[in-house]
Amino acid sequence: MPKFFITAKTTTTLLDLLTENLPKHHDAETVITCGGAWFGRKNRITDPRFRLKKNDTVQVYVNASQGLFYRIEKEHVVFEDEDLLALYKPGNLNVHAVPSSICYDLSYGVRCYLEQQGIATGPVPPTPATRLDRPVAGVVLFGKNKNSERLLFELVRNGKVKKWYIAALEKGGQTVRLRIHDTIASSGHKTALHPEGKSAATCFVKIDTLAQAEIYSVFPFTGRRHQIRFHASHYLTPVVGDIQYGSRNTFAPNEIALLCRGYNLPWKGKNLKIRLSESFLNAFYQRAAP
């Protein structure tokens, strides 16, 4: 994500400063209104008329999604009732806003979706109860109001939300079933074994063999950062396309072959099973075995 530090030489507006100093192929007003300009580390500025004094410095992030607004597609609604929303997140999409944009992420799409139903969300976008890394596709859970949001977070915190993933791993793994329990920690952009890290448990069960990949059902019993990705690469073979953890093959631009298929959770007195439809699963298989 390109980043610029721009210092005002005189008193000026944010729009004028960026128009004068950003590369010409970036539209300064779009960069600002989409949330790419920061004054200090914690102050995002979205008003082009914001006044800057001489020697004030702004931090500016740019990317290709600025000017785009994410919208929830009807076929991406996996489950919905008056309190709970389960959505398919495509790969190469952030769950939350990023420094360069507040308009192209799943949470922004949920806020727009709920507002179309007459449900006010306030100035802060809805918070997902479950999260997926940007390159991972699959189901994400949102509460449609603050009470259901709190309930979902409590269920996740207490280990009541059971997750099911499908992963395409690179050829070479002979293991049919493997249950892993170790301690891991994140350093920088990667996760690794660490004797003083947090407990991490994952079960891999091979369910199919394709020409170029082994397909596993994956059940994470804890929710550590990059847990499945690290466990696959360290104990089996890397997830297809996961260059960060040693994959030698590509899956799709900025995506890896890991899909959150669904969840089991107690909901309104029942054991609710949320699953992606077969069409999503078939599409995943087709991409894993071109």
Image: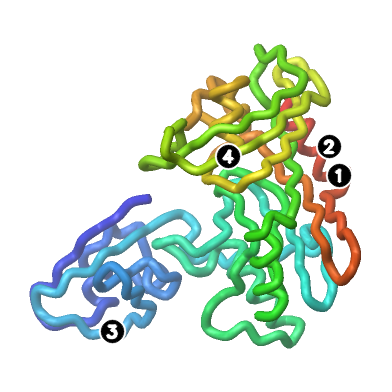
Q: Residue at x 88, y 43 (%)?
A: 278
Question: Real-space Cα distance between discs 2 and 1?
Answer: 5 Å
Q: Report the side of 132 relative to 191 (left or right).
A: right
Q: Looking at the image, is mark 2 or mark 4 nearer the viewer?
A: 4
Residues at marks 2 and 1 touching, judged by CB atoms closer than 8 Å = yes
Of the image marks 2 and 3, the number of the one nearer the N terminus:
3
The front one of 130 and 246 is 130
Q: Residue at x 66, y 34 (%)?
A: 257
Which residue in the protein does label 2 denote?
282
Residue 142 x/y as whole percent: 69, 67
Of the image marks 4 and 3, the number of the one nearer the N terminus:
3
- Asked if 253 appears above or below 131 in the picture, the reply is above
Question: Real-space Cα distance between discs 3 and 1?
Answer: 48 Å
Question: Real-space Cα distance between discs 1 and 4?
Answer: 31 Å
User: What amino acid is found at the position of numbered circle 1 in the picture?
Assistant: Ser
Which residue in the protein does label 4 denote?
200
Q: Which quadrant of the structure image shows residue 11? A: bottom left
User: What amino acid is found at the position of numbered circle 4 in the picture?
Assistant: Ala
Q: Secondary structure at mark 3?
A: loop
